[in-house]
Amino acid sequence: MKFYNLKTRSHVEVPESEVRKTKLERKTSNGVQVRYAMTATHGGSNLFKFVSEKDYTASSAKEATK
């Protein structure tokens, strides 16, 4: 999966086995907002990428532990 590394300002390719998926929920005045994201660590940097719900459910990545 392709991530953008902010430290090196370049795109990096991370193997699917190292990617974790997470669901972020927060309360708003209109209800609960849900965001879907993929996380990984590459070269000592934590990488983070927002994805759509479709990509989140289609991914075979493991759930991240909190």
Image (tube, helix red, strand yellow):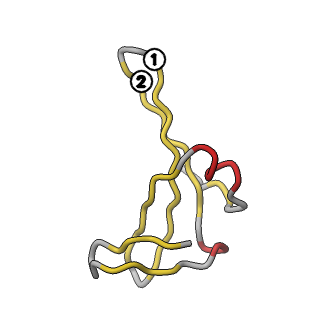
Quarter of the image with the N terminus is: bottom right
* Mark 2 crowd level (few <14, some 14–19, many ≥20, 10 Å Cα): few
* Mark 1 crowd level (few <14, some 14–19, many ≥20, 10 Å Cα): few
Q: Position of residue 24 (x, y in %)?
A: 49, 41
x 40%, y 15%: residue: 30
Q: Is residue 36 left or right of residue 7?
A: right
x 68%, y 60%: residue: 62
* Tag 1 residue: 31
Q: Reply above or below: 51 against 45.
A: above
Mark 1 vs mark 2: give the one in front: 1
Q: Do the numbered discs 1 and 2 sit on residues whose CB atoms are within 8 Å?
A: yes
Q: Is residue 51 left or right of residue 9?
A: right
Q: Position of residue 54 (x, y in %)?
A: 64, 46
Q: Is residue 62 left or right of residue 4?
A: right
**Quarter occupied by residue 43:** bottom left
Toward the viewer: 20 or 55? 55
* Tag 2 residue: 27
Q: CA distance from mark 1 to mark 2?
A: 6 Å
